[in-house]
Amino acid sequence: MQDERDAAEFDEASYTVDFAAHCDGTPTTEPITSHRRAAESMMHTLNHFLTFFAAHGYWRSRTLWGVAFALGHPMTAGRSMLEVARDLGCTKQAISKVATNYLNETGLPPSAALKTEQAKNTYKKTNGNRNTQPAN
């Protein structure tokens, strides 16, 4: 059985920020930890997974495109969700729902192609009930 380690023993706990370097413009590099390497390797694997399925006939899958947008896969570069949805014959919301569900299940942060939580909340406030009529 493996002994539990104290959090201070992990590589991630040994890094301290050089605040003066941020102020004077001196470039700093964050140490590459085993956790960071594993995360980058997993993202690399997921990108290959998506590329493989797209190349083998699954490129018309809403699920594939939803996960691709969630991860910021290179196949989404230069394409909007609306454009992809039109190609697939579905709505942008259908692809967005897959992306959101995937991110919620995995706990990953959204890619730059997706709206921020703040933007989503603003949209809900301003456009959420525009088709409903007030009751008299």
Image (cartoon, rainbow, N blue to C red):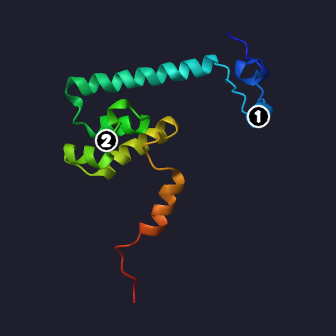
Which element carries disc 1, helix, strand or loop?
helix
Q: Earlier in the sequence, mark 2 or mark 1?
A: 1
Q: Amino acid at mark 2?
A: Arg
Residue 128 visible at all:
no
Task: Answer with left or right where residue 111 lies relative to residue 11.
Answer: left
Name the one closer to the observer, 133 or 27.
Answer: 27
Reading the image, the residue beneath label 2 is: 79
> Looking at the image, which residue is at 45% across and 62% down?
123
Q: Position of residue 38 (x, y in %)?
A: 55, 19
Reading the image, the residue beneath label 1 is: 24
> Looking at the image, which residue is at 46% across and 25% down?
43
Task: Answer with left or right where residue 29 lies relative to residue 113.
Answer: right
Label 2 with label 1: CB-CB less than 8 Å: no
Q: Residue furthest top?
A: 1
> Looking at the image, which residue is at 63% across and 19% down?
32
At label 1, counting other C-alpha atoms closer than 10 Å, the crowd grade (few under 14, some 14-19, many 20 or more) is few
Q: Position of residue 106 (x, y in %)?
A: 49, 35
Task: Answer with left or right where residue 96 lies relative to residue 29.
Answer: left
